Amino acid sequence: MTTGTTGAAEAVRAPARPAAGRAAGAGAKAGPRPRPGLRIIAPVLVFLLVMSVWTVVSELVLAADSRFLLPAPYDVIRVGVLDGANRAEILTALWSTTQIALAGLALAIVVGVLLAVVMSQARWVEHALYPWAVVLQTIPILAVVPMFGFWFGYEFESRVIVCVMVALFPTITNTLFGLKSVEPGLHDLFTLHGATRRQRLLRLQLPAALPAMITGFKISAGMAIIGSIVADFFFRQGEPGIGRMIDVYRQRLATEELLTALMWSSLVGLLLFWCFDLLGDHVDRRRSGRTRGPS
């Protein structure tokens, strides 16, 4: 079976070379690819535009006695970032929230991939489990968070469970889609060479599903941050997270600190997204190299 599987892998790669040539030709006709620096310059320009509009609204549109509702960006930086006490308070809470989000994201990825793999191997398992994954996605998280507190306590474990519940569905659905999107001809080729179900999963389905899986991880990363913040609002025992601090700043009408906390939370989600984006680019480059073969 080892020789047959090796032959199958070589046969799978061989007919992909003309397709790569056609793809390259199509890309050449479509015009030059965008410069890499554009991926940095464009978001920076949008950021500067947003900051400019924000400043104009705060300084010129709002009345002086209403300016606390939307302080200018430099006031937010001065109070929330440059002030050492406020910065330390926010970053400490942010670290607690990030730890919970990372733990929940890791569990969601492991459980989501395993469930998707099981569902991809038997149609009856998919019919039995997938509707419950959809139900899990549609349950109002704010309604069940108090019950998690009753069952599991109000500290780390309950917050992680909330993150898993929020972040699980994107990983399941994207992984399952990737596993089922393999071309039927490739399945026939593996069947022709007598591949076992395990060999088909490890050498065909999982490699083909990697781009879709990473897309699911990107979505789940942002959802895990949201789940961690939501849990912080309700579970007020243990180390305070950024969600609890946001609620405190809301009660104090400390808009500068509140906006700073929101921006730091968004930055963590953005960094996680970029990490998975870099992983996706690495996978795409390796796949493209294998498709083209040695020059």
Image: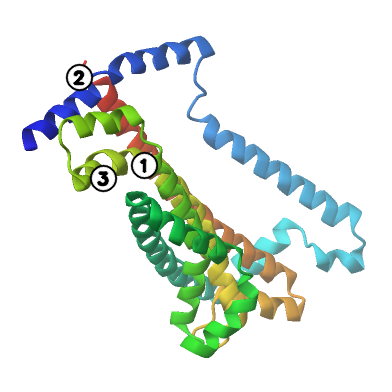
The image position of residue 103, as x and y in percent, is: 40, 69
Q: Which residue is mark 3?
A: 201
Return the residue nearer the eye: 144 or 225. Answer: 144
- In this rendering, would 283 be left or right of 72? left
- In this rendering, would 197 be left or right of 77? left
Does label 1 or label 3 sit earlier along the sequence? 3
Return the residue nearer the eye: 273 or 105. Answer: 105
> Residue at 46% across / 16% down in the picture?
27
Does label 2 or label 1 sit earlier along the sequence? 1
- Is the residue marked by circle 1 packed among few (<14), some (14-19), or many (20+) residues within 10 Å? some
Report the amino acid beneath label 2.
Answer: Pro
The image position of residue 134, as x and y in percent, is: 54, 60
> Residue at 60% across / 84% down in the picture?
146
Q: Which residue is mark 1?
A: 209
Q: In this orientation, does residue 219 appear?
A: yes
User: Quadrant location of residue 11?
Assistant: top left
> Residue at 77% across / 51% down in the picture?
54
Q: Which residue is mark 2?
A: 294
Q: Secondary structure at mark 3?
A: helix
